């Protein structure tokens, strides 16, 4: 359903740019693309629990002894049960214009130049995409020795944060269609403001114990806090004029006089605020042979929880527009015969009432093997996910308006229940970690490589009527991190990630042994 807001913006362009493709007797008098500013910021734990701190490759290996590893493998805390430790991670807020890497504007201009029915030179849209990362404290953790060799682990992590904002204004255009006895002229201008924020954070509580010289066991509980909110509007102003030998009709969208007798707004709006809490458990088992080989197994449980809160959305549309005409030749994008002469600006209304929203978080089974020498550590890890990262929603959709039956326009009201789902499934992930150590333990260099095999989950998410959107069936996502650990004092270690691809940069952290 959210895709329909993007469609309205595309619809403005298609309404103006593609109008000439509907018949050989249409022309675009003028087109102004306006300015669009898009801001996107992301924070994710995909690249690791924190910066460095014996965590190359974001694996579950117990080869390291940093307190932050309890976020992945509670059994690993027993690697050195005498070392009480606290850690904290940071990252700066960064933002840059991604046109410097991949400029969208020449590609948009190239597309517009393919339209050969412009009577005047167009004013090309100016797109300014700003991409970056959220900043601040990303995580903190601690491990503390208790009685009889038990280790208590505590942790907090900002697992996922997404901030999206878009401002668009100055889009306008005029076209004339002479494909029937009368001539239809449409003038439209549009502005938009959309925002979306989402947060997932987790608190971690673990308890572990070294059972003997080779085995350690750990149990953990994650308390997740999930919050999302968004709002937006899409405003259209304009006129429709139909004139010929025997008629001259002029009507404006949002005209207050006409609005007293029929709906004549093309404006859209949405607003929502939802939140949820969830609990997941985990089991960790570590096995080591001497000080060389480390083997680990972790099982995480999945969970499902309802999102509670408020949601409202209203979408308006012209009955004379069929979005299937964007891609399918047998459908006509704009059919002026479906405009009611006395109500040219009549618009249909669609309201979405949220019946239920639910978020799914997956579990996984992970195994890792580590090999340690005086100068280096090597880690290989494999994770198999069960479950999915997805949001399921159920809506009651109420649509009211008018449609043409033969030569007569009649009112209609329809209600339908519809379910949507959007998300990702992590089928497999392969991880490699390398830790090159200074002989005297003053510093080390860490390299991590991860490979995620992903599968899309999109149910009833469509751009065109009766045709589901398909971004990709399967995706292979590589993640690369590289950084340093440096001992500032005997008990204080500073960690810094130089490279963190494809998300997050300049992550840093401090670890202090109590």
Image (cartoon, rainbow, N blue to C red):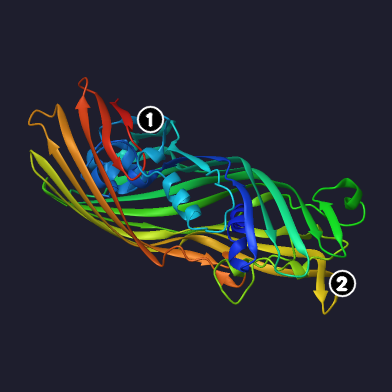
Crowding at mark 2 (Cα within 10 Å: few <14, some 14-19, many 20+): few
Left or right side of 256 for 218: left
**Residue drawn at (32%, 48%) of the image:** 73
Can you give x and y, in whole percent of width and height, for residue 335 in the image? 71, 68
Picture coordinates of residue 272 (x, y %)? 67, 47
Residue 195, placed above or below residue 451:
above
Badge 1 element: strand
Which residue matches tag 1? 90
Q: Are marks 2 and 1 in contact (CB under 8 Å)?
A: no
Residue 33 position in % (x across, y down): 57, 45
Q: Is residue 508 visible?
A: yes
* Res 410 label: 2
Residue 464 visible in the shown view:
no
- Give the answer, above or below, for where 513 lies relative to 288: above
Is 464 left, or right, of 372 in this rendering?
Answer: right
Horizontal side of 147 relative to 263 (left or right) equals: left
What residue do we see at 57% from left, 54% from top? 118
Q: Nearer the viewer, mark 2 or mark 1?
A: 2
Outermost residue on the front side: it is 245
Q: Residue at x 59, y 49 (%)?
A: 276
Q: Which label belongs to residue 218?
A: none
Crowd around label 1: few <14 · some 14–19 · many ≥20 (10 Å): some
- Percent x, y of residue 480: 26, 46
The answer to which image quadrant residue 105 occupies is top left
Q: Toward which corner of the image does residue 123 lie, by quadrant?
A: top right
**Which structural element holds mark 2?**
strand
Is residue 341 left or right of 44 when viewed as pictured?
right
Q: What number of labels is visible?
A: 2
Q: Nearer the viewer, residue 316 or 187?
A: 187
């Amino acid at each position: 359903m959210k895709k329909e807001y993007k469609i309205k913006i595309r619809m403005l362009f298609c309404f103006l740019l593609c109008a000439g493709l509907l018949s050989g007797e249409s022309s675009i008098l003028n087109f102004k693309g306006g300015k669009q500013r898009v801001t996107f910021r992301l924070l994710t734990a995909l690249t690791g629990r924190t910066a460095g701190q014996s965590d190359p490759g974001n694996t579950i290996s117990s080869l390291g002894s940093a307190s932050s590893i309890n976020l992945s493998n509670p059994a690993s805390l027993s690697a050195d049960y005498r070392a009480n430790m606290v850690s904290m991670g940071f990252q700066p807020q960064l933002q840059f214009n991604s046109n410097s890497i991949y400029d969208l504007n020449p590609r948009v201009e190239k597309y517009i130049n393919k339209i050969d029915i412009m009577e005047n030179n167009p004013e090309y849209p100016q797109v300014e995409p700003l991409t970056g990362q959220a900043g601040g404290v990303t995580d903190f953790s601690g491990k503390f020795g208790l009685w009889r060799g038990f280790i208590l682990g505590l942790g907090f992590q900002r697992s996922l944060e997404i901030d999206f904002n878009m401002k668009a204004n100055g889009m306008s255009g005029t076209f004339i269609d002479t494909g029937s006895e009368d001539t239809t002229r449409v003038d439209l201008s549009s502005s938009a403001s959309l925002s979306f924020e989402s947060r997932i954070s987790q608190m971690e509580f673990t308890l572990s114990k070294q059972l003997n010289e080779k085995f350690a066991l750990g149990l953990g509980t994650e308390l997740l806090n999930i919050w999302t909110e968004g709002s937006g509007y899409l405003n259209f102003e304009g006129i429709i004029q139909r004139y010929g030998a025997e008629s001259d009709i002029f009507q404006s969208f949002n005209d207050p006089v006409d609005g007293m007798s029929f709906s004549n707004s093309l404006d859209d709006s949405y607003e929502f605020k939802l939140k949820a809490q969830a609990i997941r458990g985990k089991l960790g088992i570590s096995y080591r042979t001497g000080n060389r080989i480390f083997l680990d197994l972790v099982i995480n449980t999945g969970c499902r929880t309802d999102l509670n809160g408020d949601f409202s959305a209203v979408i308006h549309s012209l009955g004379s527009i069929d979005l299937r005409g964007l891609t399918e030749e047998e459908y006509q994008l704009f059919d002026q015969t479906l405009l009611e002469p006395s109500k040219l600006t009549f618009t249909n209304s669609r309201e979405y009432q949220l019946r239920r929203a639910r978020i799914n978080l997956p579990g996984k089974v992970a195994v890792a093997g580590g090999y340690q020498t005086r100068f280096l550590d090597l880690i290989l890890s494999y994770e198999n996910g069960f479950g999915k990262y997805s949001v399921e929603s159920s809506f009651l959709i109420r649509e009211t308006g008018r449609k043409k039956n033969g030569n007569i326009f009649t009112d209609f009201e329809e209600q339908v229940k519809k379910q949507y789902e959007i998300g990702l499934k992590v089928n497999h992930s392969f991880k490699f970690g390398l830790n090159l150590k200074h002989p005297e333990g003053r510093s080390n260099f860490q390299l991590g490589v991860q490979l995620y095999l992903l599968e899309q989950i999109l149910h009833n998410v469509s751009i065109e009527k009766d045709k589901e959107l398909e971004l990709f069936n399967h995706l292979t996502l590589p993640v690369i991190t590289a950084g340093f650990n440096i001992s500032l004092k005997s008990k204080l270690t500073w960690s810094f990630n130089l490279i963190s691809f494809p998300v997050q940069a300049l992550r840093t952290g401090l670890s202090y042994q109590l």
